[in-house]
């Protein structure tokens, strides 16, 4: 009988600890707001707009991205929800797990040209259970480009005018996201690491760089930190860098 009492007490303690840990994760840890300063090294550096794991780096040609999974070119408008110029560049996807900071940050100095919010009737899950385990716990890459959520889920796109080139930061909601919050307004000048918004729960952020000469200094499956990690450098942009420095 004493053994049953001890076992029952142990189960109660474990349950309390588990519930307390879950409450802390969902109500405190998830909303943490650390001070972020960019690790800038050279002019033309682009920093991560979000915490998370890089799930793809795709080339943009003529305003579209080729999807190996679908075997066809995907118009950029399917991702951004609006019509950017049909230029060349790159798109990098960052998956934010529930363990990551969920604030989003300005990747490069510029002016908010426009904001495009795209609602959704239903948000599709980004990962199945096994993929979630691979990405979050095993730290293994899963190519998420071209999936249904990429085109159908709720999103908020912030277009940045950075002088001679443009960028777009796309905040994409996961199935269990309750709200995408936007902290900026059209016409607002932004510098490195200023907060753009917040996505409540796990989600994804795409950074679209409409400049053809980009050197990425991170790899697919690498962990990055929003507002801090340098993910790329813009090449052959002496004039663009001068204009960006004017914004700083």
Image (cartoon, helix red, strand yellow):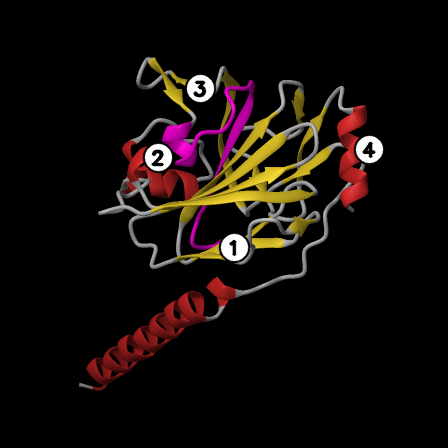
Name the residue tied to disc 2: 150
Q: Nearer the viewer, mark 2 or mark 3?
A: 3
Viewer-side residue, 244 vs 172: 244
Could you tell whether 99 is left or right of 45 in the image?
left
Q: Mark 3 or 1 closer to N-term?
A: 3
Figure quadrant of the N terminus? bottom left
Q: Which segment is the magenta one?
A: 77-103
Picture quarter containing residue 77? top left
Mark 4 and mark 1 lie on one chain; the one further toward the N terminus is 1
Q: Are marks 4 and 3 in contact (CB under 8 Å)?
A: no
Alpha-carbon span between mark 3 and mark 1: 26 Å
For the point 49% across and 15% down, the residue is 62
Q: Earlier in the sequence, mark 2 or mark 3?
A: 3
Magenta-drawn stretch contains 85: yes
Q: In the rendered image, which residue does mark 4 sit on?
A: 242
Q: Which residue is mark 3?
A: 64
Label 1 element class: strand
């Amino acid at each position: 009988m004493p053994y049953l009492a001890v076992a029952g007490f142990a189960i109660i303690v474990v349950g309390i600890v588990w519930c307390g840990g879950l409450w802390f994760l969902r109500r405190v840890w998830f909303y943490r707001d650390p001070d972020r300063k960019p690790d800038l090294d050279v002019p033309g550096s682009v920093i991560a707009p979000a915490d998370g794991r890089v799930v793809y780096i795709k080339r943009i040609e003529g305003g579209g991205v080729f999807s190996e999974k679908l075997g066809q070119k995907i118009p950029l408008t399917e991702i951004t929800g609006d019509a950017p110029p049909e230029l060349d560049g790159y798109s990098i996807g960052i998956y934010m797990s529930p363990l990551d900071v969920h604030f989003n940050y300005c990747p490069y100095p510029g002016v908010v040209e426009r904001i495009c919010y795209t609602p959704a009737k239903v948000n599709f899950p980004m990962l199945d259970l096994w993929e979630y385990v691979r990405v979050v716990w095993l730290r293994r890459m899963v190519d998420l480009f071209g999936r249904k959520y990429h085109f159908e889920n709720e999103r908020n796109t912030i277009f940045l005018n950075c002088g001679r080139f443009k960028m777009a930061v796309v905040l994409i909601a996961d199935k269990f996201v309750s709200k995408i919050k936007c902290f900026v307004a059209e016409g607002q000048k932004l510098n490195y690491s200023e907060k753009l918004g917040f996505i409540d729960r796990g989600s994804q952020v795409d950074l679209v760089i409409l400049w053809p000469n980009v050197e990425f200094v991170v790899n697919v499956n690498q962990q990055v930190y929003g507002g801090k990690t340098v993910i790329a450098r813009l090449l052959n942009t002496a004039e663009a860098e001068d204009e960006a420095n004017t914004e700083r």
